[in-house]
Amino acid sequence: MLKSCKYCMRIHDSKFDCGKKPKRNKEPTKINKFRWSRKWREKRNQIIERDKYLCQMSLREDPPRYVYANLEVHHIIPIEEDWDKRLDDDNLITLSEEYHEKAERGEISREILIEIARENNEHNGWQTL
């Protein structure tokens, strides 16, 4: 069966390897293993619950928006920078996909995100590690 290839933009048999498709790393990294772990899934759910199932940056817009779809939990200080903060409540915040991308690009300061996460921990009576 002929198919349009999204890698080389040509039409060829679907089983044909044009050589343009990126090769996947077969060995999972330490970070990927963590992201697939039960500990991370549980912590992720806990943070979303703590943040009331809402994007924390959208709530701070003027006027506030209540965004509850496509939520992601963001590591304010990335795992690559500090492995020990990967499950730290003060380092995790619920963001919409839009704000998560902005945070990843550095368009939202880490200080603001950390302050919001700490406020949410204190407001909910959570103890941070």
Image: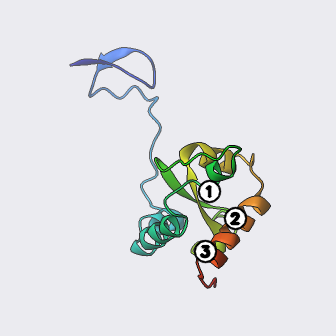
Q: From mark 1 to mark 2, how far is it between C-alphas? A: 8 Å
Foreground mark, 1 or 3, reads: 1
Q: Which mark is residue 116?
A: 2
Quarter the N terminus occupies: top left
Vertical arrangement, residue 73 with respect to residue 129, above or below: above
Return the residue at label 1.
Answer: 56
Q: Amino acid at mark 3?
A: Asp
Foreground mark, 3 or 2, reads: 2
Numbered-mark total: 3
Is there a contact, CB below 8 Å, between mark 1 and mark 3? no
Quarter the C terminus occupies: bottom right
Q: From mark 1 to mark 3, how far is it between C-alphas? A: 14 Å
Q: Is residue 123 visible?
A: yes
* Element on which disc 2 rests: helix
Q: Quadrant of residue 109?
A: bottom right
In the rendered image, the residue lying farthest to the front is 63
Return the residue at label 3.
Answer: 89
Is there a contact, CB below 8 Å, between mark 3 and mark 2? no
Dot 1: within a 10 Å radius of its alpha carbon, few (fewer than 14), some, or many (20 or more) residues? Answer: many
Q: Residue 108's spot in the image, x, y percent?
A: 74, 50
Q: Amino acid at mark 2?
A: Ile
Q: From mark 3 to mark 2, how far is it between C-alphas? A: 11 Å
